[in-house]
Image (cartoon, grey):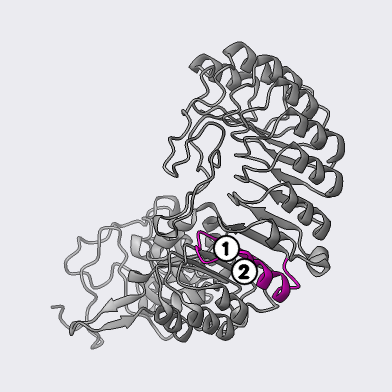
Amino acid sequence: MSSPGVDGDPKPPCLPRNGLVKLPGQPNGLGAASITKGTPAAKNRPCQPPPPPTLPPPSLAAPLPRAALAGGLCPPAGLPLGGPASAPVPGPPVERPPLATDEKILNGLFWYFSACEKCVLAQVCKAWRRVLYQPKFWAGLTPVLHAKELYNVLPGGEKEFVNLQGFAARGFEGFCLVGVSDLDICEFIDNYALSKKGVKAMSLKRSTITDAGLEVMLEQMQGVVRLELSGCNDFTEAGLWSSLSARITSLSVSDCINVADDAIAAISQLLPNLAELSLQAYHVTDTALAYFTARQGHSTHTLRLLSCWEITNHGVVNVVHSLPNLTALSLSGCSKVTDDGVELVAENLRKLRSLDLSWCPRITDMALEYVACDLHRLEELVLDRCVRITDTGLSYLSTMSSLRSLYLRWCCQVQDFGLKHLLAMRSLRLLSLAGETPAPPPVPPRWSRVRVPHGALGGGCPRSATAHLPPTVGCPLLTTTGLSGLVQLQELEELELTNCPGATPELFKYFSQHLPRCLVIE
């Protein structure tokens, strides 16, 4: 302990080697870097050697201690660091926040991190969390919550619903709930502050929601305009009739075994403002597509019919007449659609910008001729697993000046000569010749007892839903020489060659030299 000084004040404690001491804050606001009473800094230091006879020049003054720098304090003007206070202090020092907590810097820095990294960074300190929990950093992201994550187990064995305040602070407008029940959804509505009006999109996957739960959810959550139901086998078509609201503009239904033609009738009559419809249903027939009326014709611009195995060219007729304003159409996995159906699409849907004909084994080069002649606005064309497409079909596509994305995965008859036709497509930005195993058209679950039509999984596939997938080699006839010619597409931004036999390490090196702006996926 230090002994009292001459004037009754306690002597300062032993100082560090740099000659400065961190004193308690003073009423004058100088803080820890101030020196009391204007006395020399070396006065009353019994534990320090006597001061030198001359003061060191300002350039040799000792630096501020690390604690002072961390606090962002500056020495008073005119006061040499480590020397006596020979001049009065003009005013309080200028305080600057440390760089690590400067919100202006953090607001720019955090944009460079992924969503998962932001979740980790938000746990560093309160200052970082305050910045990161701004809704702008989470726009467009959808949290995925599993049923087991919605509850905390208390010591007594009881369950308590988790605190969702962190999600509300970030302003999430959409949620994906996996494996939930009617009770879980009710608990979510009661505990999430923004559930009534703030949630715009809801996705339920592999859940046991019933007709009653679906009705309560859409009645309570008045802000929901985008709805996705995937793998929910406990609700029925009657539940759709009783719960669907006219405010819904986007609906996706997949792997729900109780969805059939009557469900499409409910959708067409109850959703006049529907803009996007994605449907994967094994029981839907051509009759269902006749339910669409002129009301959807004005509003619906996107229609995805995925693995609707019973739909034929007659169903396509109903689509093109009822929905003339479509800009995106997918017939992926509709194995009964032929070239005649594609001709109907090309002649009547002139506004199309995206067309997906993947996993349609009956499509031939003739269909591509129809597409090239009539769809002048088309920007994306997906032909994955169209095994009858040859070089002749690619010659038709070479005349399409607006096409930007072309997918030819598993087009096993395409050869080097066909690639030469693509070299004339200067607008092409993405080309996929990959052979990795894409997600095949989903097969119905065992309990649905749906007979898989012959050829529904592609040409030559057996009738069993567990049919063997094609080999991983996608375009086996393409050689290194043919692929090397793609360097003429200097505007190409992405080239996918995964598992392509002609793609060698030497070829990838060649592409890196001659296509420096293109992302080549090996």
Judge whether residue 54 can be spotted in this image: yes
Q: Nearer the viewer, residue 132 or 80?
A: 132
Percent of width and height locating residue 519: 59, 32
Is 154 above or below relative to 265? Answer: below
Q: Which residue is mark 2?
A: 263
Is 229 above or below relative to 491? Answer: below
Percent of width and height locating residue 279: 61, 58
Whether residue 133 is in magenta: the answer is no
**Amino acid tagged 2:** Ala
Q: Quadrant of residue 401?
A: top right
First to last magenta residue range: 251-274
Disc 2 to disc 1, C-alpha distance: 10 Å
Judge whether residue 65 can be spotted in this image: no
| Rendered residue at 57%/71% (across/down) | 173
List the single residue furthest toward the top.
Answer: 481
* Circles 2 and 1 in contact, beta carbons < 8 Å: yes
List the single residue furthest toward the left.
Answer: 1
Decide if residue 188 is on the left or right side of residue 517: left
| Rendered residue at 83%/49% (across/down) | 349
Q: Where does the N terminus fall, quadrant-wise?
A: bottom left
Callout 1 secondary element:
strand
Neighbor class of circle 1 (other Cα within 10 Å; few <14, some 14-19, many 20+) is: some
Decide if residue 128 is on the left or right side of residue 426: left
Q: Quadrant of residue 356?
A: top right
Q: Which residue is mark 1?
A: 253
Percent of width and height locating residue 501: 51, 19
